[in-house]
Image (tube, helix red, strand yellow):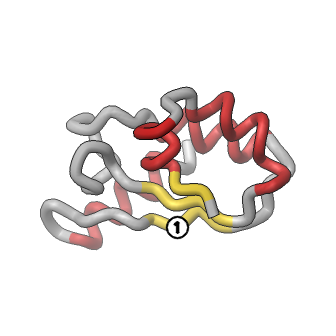
Amino acid sequence: MKSIIHMQIMEGDVVRTINETLPLIRHFHTAGNPGRHDLDAEQEINYPPICKAISAGSYDGYVGQEFLPKGDPITAQEHAFKECNH
């Protein structure tokens, strides 16, 4: 498992790290940073290019949405799905 939020906190260069380690990863987790909240403009992780890097590789595993919604959970999940499926 690779937590995208922890890659951002610990390493910072998320897309490069994904490109270098993708064959070893079987599951990703998303969450906003700071706060593990919604994937929105209030957090520092830009998910569309990260998800494009994941899709561009030979990855066939899961991307789990593991965040704490600030408001309506269904709306937050719909937005996260759109962010990760550009």
Q: Residues within 10 Å of mark 1 (few under 14, many from 20)?
A: few
Residue 25 lies left or right of residue 11; in this view the side is right
- Up-down relation of residue 10 to residue 82 (above or below): above
| Residue 35: % across, % down | 22, 52
User: Which residue is rendered at x = 52% and y = 33% of the image?
Assistant: 11
User: Which residue is rendered at x = 86% and y = 50% of the image?
Assistant: 58
Q: How many marks?
A: 1
| Residue 22: % across, % down | 77, 47
Q: Which residue is mark 1?
A: 64
Residue 29 lies left or right of residue 70; in this view the side is right
Closest to the observer, 40 or 24? 24
Q: Residue furthest left?
A: 71
Q: Residue furthest front?
A: 10
> Three-letter amino acid code at disc 1?
Gly
Q: Quadrant of residue 13?
A: top right
Q: Quadrant of residue 63?
A: bottom right
Q: Quadrant of the C terminus?
A: top right
User: Which residue is rendered at x = 32% and y = 33% of the image?
Assistant: 44
Closest to the observer, 86 or 51? 51
Q: Quadrant of the N terminus?
A: bottom right
| Residue 77: % across, % down | 35, 65
| Residue 29: % across, % down | 51, 61
Q: Secondary structure at mark 1?
A: strand
